[in-house]
Amino acid sequence: MWTTFVVQPMINLLLWIYSLVGNFGLAIIIFTVLIRLILYPLMRQQTKSAEAMQKLQQDPRWKEIQRKYKNDRERLAQEQMKLYQELGVNPFASCLPMLIQIPVIFGLYQAIILALGNTPAQLLELTALIYPGWDAAKLLPIDSHFLWMDLSRPERLTIPGLNFGIPVMALLVAYTGYIQAKVASSVSPTSGSDQAQSMNTMMSYYMPLMLGYFAMTFASGLALYFLTSNLVSIAQYALMGKLSWRDLIPFGGGKK
């Protein structure tokens, strides 16, 4: 079921885009932009929900709950959830785009590895996943080179004079992931339930580090997806007027 509904459609879409542009790196970039455009309504909803949370925290009822139950964490959480439901506010909405991306990330990794296979067994497995009705066999095997990278292998940039490669893509993924999370948190409430705060902290710090680790460890085609996704997401926030130049400075102050 996973292969049929996630991996196989991705493989065929990537191959179709590759047949148009003739470069698998560009195919991944275009694929990523399409994914981000599909997720854009969720990002808009995330922003609206965050603004609603900010307004909620100025509500007298919210402040009264904080004062009345400050020494009873369980009752405080219950009353907060009641107020969320009453006003139609979802404190976890800011996490939805990333949670939805998780199956995309794992599915794309499998799709890239399968699409870039070049042994007879790998090509046979790939051919079996191509939808009938179009001749994709002529595209195989796919050229895995893009810029200085082999998209089927972890990326390292070799600089003359150094006896080790620099994981440039991993560093860029971690940096842009942090900036993207920083901008997202700037439109999210700074207080709320402990669960929501914990989730926001994870998204702001742990997730960029985890994606950077994935980018350093796995095929660089996946790193290219991460980087493009982060850049498009930052651009979308800029178009919504939610980005300031200070947000682009690591550990600098965000938009006030």
Image (cartoon, rainbow, N blue to C red):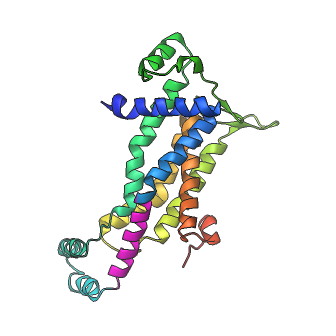
Q: Residue furthest top?
A: 120
Q: Which residues are magenta?
A: 42-58
Question: Which residue appears at 50% of the width and 61% of the height?
Answer: 181
Work out whether residue 151 can be spotted: no
Q: Residue 201: x percent and y percent?
A: 42, 62
Question: Which residue appears at 64% of the width and 70% of the height?
Answer: 245
Work out whether residue 37 can be spotted: yes
Q: Residue 127: x percent and y percent?
A: 47, 17
Question: Which residue appears at 52% of the width and 66% of the height?
Answer: 183
Q: Quadrant of the C terminus?
A: bottom right
Q: Residue furthest right?
A: 161
> Which is more toward the observer, 165 or 31?
31
| Residue 8 placement: quadrant | top left
**What is the count of numbered marks?**
0
Question: Which residue appears at 51% of the width and 51% of the height?
Answer: 209
> Which is more toward the observer, 13 or 206?
13
Q: Quadrant of the N terminus?
A: top left
Question: As drawn, is 203 to the left or to the right of 64?
Answer: right
> Which is more toward the observer, 121 or 127?
127
Q: Main secondary structure of the magenta part?
A: helix
Question: As drawn, is 229 to the left or to the right of 63?
Answer: right
Q: Is residue 46 magenta?
A: yes
Q: Is residue 154 magenta?
A: no
Q: Is residue 121 above or below residue 108?
A: above
Q: Is residue 246 above or below residue 172?
A: below
Q: Is residue 84 above or below residue 34?
A: below
Q: Residue 50: x percent and y percent?
A: 39, 71
